[in-house]
Image (cartoon, rainbow, N blue to C red):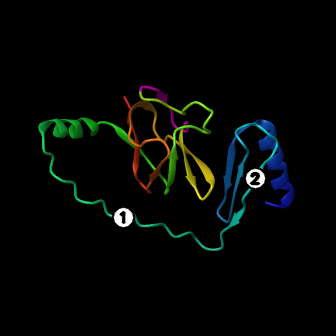
Amino acid sequence: MDIKDIQNLIKFVSKAEVSEVKYKTKDFEITIKTPLAGSDVAYAQPAVYHTAPQQMAAAPAPAAASPISSEKTEAASDDSKYVTIKSPMIGTFYRKPSPDKEVFINVGDEVSDGKVVCVIEAMKLFNQIESEVSGKIVKILVDDATPVEYDQPLFLVDPS
C-alpha cells in the first residue's frame, strides 16, 4: 500500500463518518480513527511487520476456591450455558464511546456478531471491542472505567 492509497483511505473514512477502520495484511497494518464528534480529523498509525508477531501465552488462572453456599453453586452451573465475551487486551474498560454519549449495551439488549459492546483504552488509544457471538446480554461483569486484564470476562451472553 503506497502513500496515495493511505491518503485516499483516510479521506474515505472521514467522509463515511465511521469512527475506526482497520486494514491488515501479512506485512502491513493500518488503523484509522476519527473523533466520535464527527470532525474531519483522521489519525493513521501504520505498522510494518518484518517477522511474524509472537503470541502471548495466557497466564494460568488461579485455582477457584470451593463455593461456600449452594446458591453460589447454582449460579456457577447456571452461567455455564452462557457465552463469555472476554477482553482481548489490557486497559481501562468503558461502556460508553465518550462521557456524554449513551452506553453501547445494557443487560437484556440483543447483540450480533460484530456489534461494538464496549471500548478499552490502552496507552491513550480507544479500541472498540466487538461481540464475537449473537445473543442477549445477561450480565455485565465489569464496572465502567475500571482496569481489565487480558482474557478477563466482560459480558455473559445467552446465545439462544
Which quadrant holds the N terminus?
bottom right
- Counting from the top left corner in percent of width and height, residue 103 is at 54, 32
- From the viewer's perspective, tell me whether residue 51 is left or right of residue 68: right
- Counting from the top left corner in percent of width and height, residue 59 is at 36, 64
- Mark 2 → mark 1, Cα distance in angstroms: 33 Å
Residue type at the position of mark 2: Tyr
Residue type at the position of mark 1: Ala
For label 1, the residue is 59
For label 2, the residue is 43
Q: Secondary structure at mark 2?
A: strand
Q: Which mark is residue 77?
A: none
- From the viewer's perspective, tell me whether residue 58 is left or right of residue 88: left
Q: Identify the residue shown where x is 32% and y is 63%.
A: 60
Mark 2 residue crowding within 10 angstroms, few (<14) / some (14–19) / many (20+) = some
- Magenta span: 108-116
Identify the residue at the far right of this view: 4
